[in-house]
Image (cartoon, rainbow, N blue to C red):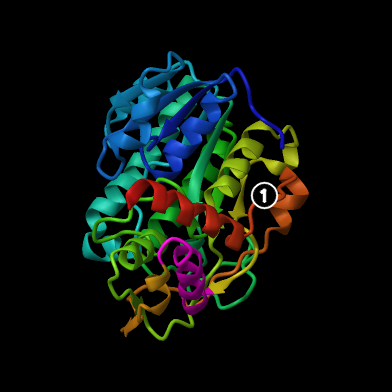
Amino acid sequence: MLQIENKTILVTGGAGFIGSNLCEHLLEFNNKVVCLDNFATGRTQNIQHLLTNPNFTLIVGDIRNLADCHKAAQGVDYILHEAALGSVPRSINDPITSNDVNVSGFLNMLVAARDAKVKRFIYAASSSTYGDSEALPKVEHTIGKPLSPYAITKYVNELYADIFQRTYGLDTIGLRYFNVFGRKQDPNGAYAAVIPKFVMQLMAHENPVINGEGNYSRDFTYIDNVIQMNVLAMVTENPAALNTVYNTAFGDRTTLNDLMTSLKKYLSVFDPAIADIKTIYGPNRAGDIPHSLASIDKAKQLLGYNPDFSMQQGLEQAVNWYWENLK
């Protein structure tokens, strides 16, 4: 895989799950990394080991504060904008805060990127943008109506990015993440992602709860594939690859029932009793898309994307990490 080296890169939300993995990877290739985070959802332990690295700078700040954005963007070559309030349920419970962070904060970062004359602004878009479109696999140019406030905010990001390129000449690339999972993903809290939540429940011998009948499916995407896409988005010199959005996924789908079977399989290597833990089924969750499957043809053609990890390969790695670090 192509790498980016000897650059200065701002990672917003750099203490979060995806952001901290990006920071760690970029530092391995002699880049200078600036991390901007307000620790609303980011965690100090994700970046604790980076704080003594002379190439790593932590700025504790909020993307809702334009001055913080300007400070963080000063002198950087690229911005990887990961900061956001994720979670469909969170946005349904508190749409105003989700909008403030995901739309107003995003706009602040675009303004800061423009003013700092960064080479490229790469941002975390979302598969939630596909909304009620039933077409499978999901292709970038066909979307439906959003099904949650969160989905609206992520679609607005794409519109703003497009306008900033047309109006100010700021090159952007949006990466529509599909159910990213892996090391450092927080298993705790009301809005924890499904894989670490299930892992923690199974390790504690609790009965995991699946929303619905378990037939909903997702294109679960291992963190290393996401890192690859962010690097490719920075290094590409193909003009046709800029100022657009890409599905960031593996290109396969797994039902929640199949996910549970795989988790039990990998965890029972460490604890055989886990194989017999029963699953509980609850009601479907408001705003959930029934099925999600990405076409990754566009990313392959324009960016040279070739995902390193299948869902099963990534899941085994993730389970091993959780067992070692959280048991």
Expressed as whole percent of the image width and height from the top left, the position of residue 316 reads 54, 58
Expressed as whole percent of the image width and height from the top left, the position of residue 173 reads 58, 42
| 179 left or right of 60 in image | right
Question: Does 321 appear above or below 36?
Answer: below
Q: SS of the residue at dot 1?
A: loop
The residue sitting at 50% across, 36% down in the picture is 22
The residue sitting at 37% across, 38% down in the picture is 13
Question: Does 142 appear above or below 83?
Answer: below
Question: Does 184 appear above or below 133?
Answer: above
Q: Which residue is mark 1?
A: 308
Based on the picture, tell me whether residue 94 belongs to the magenta stretch: no
Viewer can see residue 145: no
| 327 left or right of 20 in image | left
| 208 left or right of 125 in image | left
Q: Quadrant of residue 87?
A: bottom left
Viewer can see residue 101: yes
Expressed as whole percent of the image width and height from the top left, the position of residue 326 reads 33, 50
Magenta-colored segment: predominant secondary structure: helix
Question: Does 198 appear above or below 12?
Answer: below
Q: Quadrant of residue 214?
A: bottom left
The residue sitting at 52% across, 22% down in the picture is 117
Expressed as whole percent of the image width and height from the top left, the position of residue 103 reads 36, 47
Amino acid type, callout 1: Asp
Q: Residues within 10 Å of mark 1 (few under 14, many from 20)?
A: some
The residue segment tinted magenta is 255-271
Based on the picture, tell me whether residue 259 belongs to the magenta stretch: yes
| Camera-side residue of 78 and 239 | 78
**Count of numbered circles on the image:** 1
> Quarter of the image containing the N terminus?
top right
